[in-house]
Image: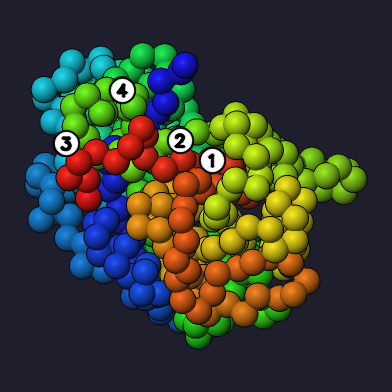
Amino acid sequence: MTDPVVVTGLGIVSPTGLGTAPYWSATRRGVSGIGPITRFEADGYPARLAGEISGFVAGEHLPGRLLPQTDRMTQLALVAGDWALADAGITPADLPAFDMGVCTASAQGGFEFGQNELRNLWSQGSRYVSAYQSFAWFYAVNSGQISIRNGMKGPSGVVVSDQAGGLDAVANARRQVRKGTAVMVTGAVDASLCPWGWVAQLASRRLSTSDDPDRAYLPFDERANGHVPGEGGAILVMERASRAVARGAHVYGQVAGYGATFDPAPGSGGRPGLARAIRLALAEADVPPENVDVVFADAAGIPELDQAEADAITEVFGPYGVPVTAPKTMTGRLYSGAAPLDLAAALLAMDEGLIPQTVNVTPAERYRLDLVTDHPRAAQLCSALVLARGYGGFNSAVLLRSGYPQRVAGAR
């Protein structure tokens, strides 16, 4: 029997809370982190709401030497990585360097750092551009900085597939653990709430232009008209189940199945690929549809994309066949960070036996979904399916199982 790959550490940085306990408390209570943008003057833009992280002071968590060479995205990722390793009970210095690896995802890179250096170039000249610009903007910078900070010399990589990338990175990390790497740090954190990054996001024409935080991001609702972007995400620690149990670690759950597909070109007449990604994940996990206890939806907030996702879910599970939730309505869509945060939420939901609610949404009958709204729903959760789609046609699905082989005594 293949030794399952499990999650033993979570590090969460979210608009609704810094750290696992504050995030989960806010999620259980339906507290939203969406509001008017404060990180820059947004009055002149058509979209003016975001899920911002408040109360984060990088200098309180990281050495001063790192601050001038890192974007906000990377600072958040480094702290989330520290928290995930501490949660897993792993001290990197105690392990061989080549037994530890990192794989993260990124949708945008360090936009704010790049914007500031371009401003210096235009206003003062090339001598005022930081040498750190050469890597601080780069998609792979979070993987690089986490590995450097923790002395990790094992497999390292980055996946760039927009929101789907967070699940793809976790799947790649699982692959490395199966190949023999003892510990993989994975997941994603994105942060691009700056004018340059905002304009890039507006180009998708998918951002909500509502100024009411309670009505701006309403997936599967007749009033849906776009999404609200946010910043943050989650970093996870993954290892073999036998290793985790042997050292007495808390096992959040098993990454049991994964599927990824790509949608056909628009106008080609081909079928969207999300349903197939779901079936691939269930098949690998050897879990029939009727044994899936909850689906964490991608929840685009665009009517045609919501319809496509609802069609995929009902095709596999039947109309109203499985509880569906989208806690990202409290944080906004965090791009590559969104799906790892959903994975964390799903693991915490299974731990407690509670499906978090989709806030502010009145589900439209035409979607035929059992959408959990208004308040959390108590349920015995042994498995959870997390879905993610990326701009341009990426589809990914991950099936989680509850802790393996049993809860360790004293687990949180």
Q: Which circle's residue, 1 or 3, is located before the other in the chain?
A: 3
Disc 4 marks a residue whose amino acid type is Ser
Pointer 2 or 3: first along the chain? 3
The residues bearing labels 4 and 3 have C-alpha atoms spaced at a distance of 15 Å
Q: Residue at x 54, y 40 (%)?
A: 398
- The alpha-carbon separation of the residues under discs 1 and 4 comes to 21 Å
Q: CA distance from mark 4 to mark 2?
A: 14 Å
Label 4 Cα neighbours within 10 Å, binned few <14 / some 14-19 / many ≥20: some
Cα gap from disc 1 to disc 3, whole angstroms = 25 Å
* Placement of 91 over or under 97, stated as above or below: below
Residue on which the image places disc 4? 242
On residue 89, the disc is 3
The residue that disc 2 covers is: 255
The residue identified by callout 1 is: 398
The answer to whether marks 2 and 1 mark residues whose Cβ atoms lie closer than 8 Å is yes
In the image, is 259 to the left or to the right of 406? right
SS class of the residue under badge 1? strand
Q: Tell me the element at label 4.
A: helix
Give 400 or 398, whichever is nearer the viewer: 400
Residue 26 rendering spot, x and y as whole percentages = 32, 70
Residue 333 at what x, y percent from top left? Answer: 49, 61
Q: Earlier in the sequence, mark 4 or mark 3?
A: 3
* 361 or 138, nearer to the observer: 361
Comparing 128 with 369, the one in front is 369
Determine the secondary structure under disc 3.
loop
- Is residue 71 rendered to the left or right of residue 376? left
Q: Are marks 4 and 3 in contact (CB under 8 Å)?
A: no
